[in-house]
Amino acid sequence: MKKHWNKLAHESGEDDTDVGHLVRQLGSPLRSRRERALAGLAGIADDPANQLIMAQGGAVRTLAKAVSREEGEAQCHALRSLSCLASGQGQIRGEMIDVGIVNAMAGLLRGVDAQARTCAAEVLANLSCEDRGKEAIIRTGIGAVLAQSVSSGQAPIEESALRLVGNLLIYNPGFAVEIADAGLVGRLVKVMQVGKGLSRRWAARVLALLLEGSDERRDQVIAAGGVGALLAAVLLIGQDWERAEWAMQSLACVAGCRAGRAAIIEARGVPNIVRTLSSNVGGCRDSAARALAYMALVDDAENMKHMEEGIPALVAMVQSGAEGVKKSAIAALGNMARSGAAAQEAVAKGGAVQPMVWGLASTDAAMRSTMLGSLDAVTRENAANMLEAFQGGAIPPLIRILGDEGAAPLHSQVLTLLAGMLSHCPDARPAFTLAGGFDAVIRFLPMGNPDKCGPAMRLLSVLAESEELQAALVAYDALPIVSRGIRSGDAGVQASALALLAAVARCADGSDSSFLSSEDVRTVVELTRSQSDVTCRQAAATLAGLSSCSLIYKSQVAACGAVPALVDLLASGCVECMGQAARALGALASGSSDNQAVIGEAGAVPPLVFILGIGSPECAEAGVTALAELVRGSSPNLTRLAEQRAAGTLASLLAAGAPGCQDKAAYLLALLSRSVAADSDDSLTAGVITDMLTHLQGMLVSGGHEREALGLRALQDFVCSSRASEELHVRPIIGAVGMLLVSEDKAVREEAREVLERLAQRSRDLPLEDVEVPLLVPFIRNGSPFVCEKALDALTEMVRKGDPSKEGETIIRNHGVAALVRVLTFGTEACKVKCARVMEMLVRGCEAAQARLVQEGAVRPLVHMLAVEGEESQASARGVLSILTGKDVGAMSPEERSTVVMELLTARRAARGGGSAEGLAVRARAMQRAGSMGVADSDVGSTGEEDEDSLLSPVSTASGSRLRMRDLPDLVLCPITQEVMTDPVIAADGHTYEKAAILSWFSKHTTSPMTNEELPSLNVIPNQTVVQLISNLRPGLGAPS
């Protein structure tokens, strides 16, 4: 019939007549005619041309009457025609609405005839394309009826009802309340699970519309098991992308609550969501990114691992997606970065930092805010990511945001981000200055807005060492503003102002005390009793900075009652507060005996000892430093420390603390070793003392003047204690202290000599010269020019102050003359001058030294100096030669001088007996050596002369030859093997041995190989001093290092 009526409609001149005839037949009193007409119209009504003819012929009103008059199949034909008309032109739908078809269809929908209900739902779904139609339908109040139709189990009515509900929700979201109250959410989930045809697609659409902004309906979806149905729909994106898109939108809403995220994880849905990021459906990708932004809030390692697989896709969306997609993707990346350091690294490695930096220049305020928040999350406490952001050009756009009044809500976050970036990336500071950062930040200092004032002060505290900041603070008269900040009622501003003042104080040169008044200092002291740990910590840090920067502030801080407040803060329980309080007390005690006494009497020692053992490296370092300052030169405080039985705690720091802690702990243990009050401390054992001395020896050879000075001060006290056993403790220290006789620091050199004097007093029958000379000779012989000069200075001072005859014999006995001749031959001019001065002092007061100098070959280099060296060298050489020859060689002509020198050398040969047994032995060795080297017999005489010089000189003329064993200090030779040690260790008898040799001895003996006495222990400890000495002597020893 449809084909028939279509054919009639296209025949010229008869279309209007035939369709019109059918329309007119609808008014026939005969039911059969009306039914045939309705059937005919239903067959042709889907043709747009026929729809127009029918509308012009008044079919809309006639069909509306037919719907209410007819029943059964005829009624369905009428409804079919109306549905087709409603799908046509808007003008026809408007007429249908005007004639009240909406109410008629609503009435049918409430009926029981399934076919009529299906057709009515279809008509209403088509009419809902018009806003007037939506309004009219909503006014009928059929929400509950539609909700029931959704779960009817009949696909046609479900599809129409769902399509109608979707259109109504898009037009009026408030309609969701009416239909959701009717239990629609649960029915939608059921349709998605078991529905047929397009019902599942429309159900996904309606569900997504219902979930927007409704926590209650979101909970209903979760309770009904809808998460699994939504994930299943997402998986079918290739078959029905529209359903997948709506389902993904619903999942994004569900993920917005904790229960929804738990349900998604339980259903193992995260991998499916991540895969959706790579689809070609834009809506799916956007919703997936939104869902992942919520899922990143879950603290679950497996969940995060799956999400990290989607980082490249998210970064690609940020780089090339639309604005909405970018925002969702960047939010997901930001939340992922907030979940932990590993996720931060993954996001950065995925290339997200640079797009985030570019996004800071966005003109969209919401987008810029999202980019800023994500960049803050990726870079927070991550130096590498901050550096990447800086290198990507983050500083200029951040400064521009600070200058944009329209971006005021972002200013606080920008200030915090800049503070972190400048703190972790010093290279960013010039860029900050060039971008006008100081001008942009300092304007936030006035206290009008605490949310910005505090972060601004924190940022500037990072730049306290910058000259630009100092100039900017002065130019803007900002320091008074900062000082007023400490009196602000806002705890955040107070803490930030204190941080900035502490930083400024640390950089002050001590000459300007005007940036903080006495009243301000008193306020800072009061803030150490604040209820806020942050404020207390910063106040203590400020007091520490002030006490360190100048004596004026140190006096003010003490006068304002800081000591009792800081002592109370030591017992606050806040680790950071205790550490800062300890630093402040240490700064106050440094160099002030009055403050030392006040702090000690205030009861600071017990809590300082306590914080050494709480497990915080920062507290331990601050506490041990404060204790070192308190007991230095203060017997009462040392007694208080000893009474706390702190040796065990200090020994723990010595064994496992930071390097600075170990040094101070060793120093304190050395002081405790001489305290009578420490005698009852069982933890101050011989083993602890041995460990302490080993560490002090390491400090003495560290090369740092401060460590050397501290180690020497500790040894000064230790060698005066009753615990300093000669055999076990004194001898190994001598070598370590001797290393400092040639220190660059004059004070260290002088203190080293004082320590050696005390060490010599502690050792039986060990004069000071017998301590110093063996230590100095290797430095003279093998040291660098600087070391050689310092060693010669020390030797000169020793000879000058002592008995030249006695000192000369000691030098000869320790092969020092040979070392002096070596310097005279190969040293620099400055060394030669100093060497000649020592020789002059020796030959004036020691006849043995005169003979030894001639014997060791000093004449020739002296003559050479007299002939070719500078004026100062000539004067020194002239003095020595004049004493040796008994004549004023300076006034002689070269010929006369040569004659005198030849006479001296001839006398030398005669004294050594050229034909004596000794001379024959020397010549025999020379002949043997000449033969092995292929030297002609005629050259034996000259070879013997050279060999004689080489036997008596510590330096062989052959390059790279080893030193004679007799020229080496006993300290580097093993008493058992008589060879240079490679792994020196100290045994319980106090002597140093080669480790393998002494262990071999101990395998058969329990006595000392040197004293033959029973040893209390067979343990050995490394001798770092000898290791260092052997290292310095390596070039001369010719052994591999």
Image (tube, rainbow, N blue to C red):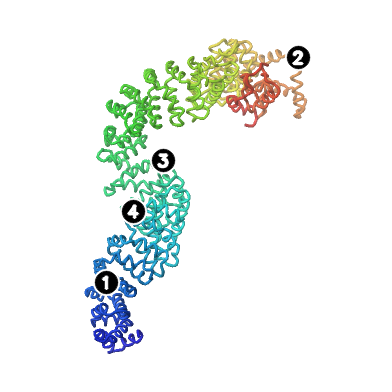
Q: Which numbered dot is residue 424?
A: 3
Q: Which residue is at a point 37% across and 18% down the rendered structure image?
A: 594
Q: Tell me how far mark 2 sits from mark 3, CA to CA.
A: 79 Å
Foreground: disc 2 or disc 3? 3
Residue tagged 2: 916
Q: Tell me how far mark 1 sits from mark 4, CA to CA.
A: 49 Å
- Residue type of the residue flagged with mark 2: Ser
Residue tagged 1: 107
Q: Which numbered dot is residue 367?
A: 4
- Residue type of the residue flagged with mark 4: Met
Mark 1 neighbour class, 10 Å CA radius: few under 14, some 14 to 19, many 20 or more: some
Percent across and percent down for residue 171 are 28, 64
Foreground: disc 3 or disc 1? 1
First of labels 2, 4 by sequence position: 4
First of labels 2, 3 by sequence position: 3
- Residue type of the residue flagged with mark 1: Gly
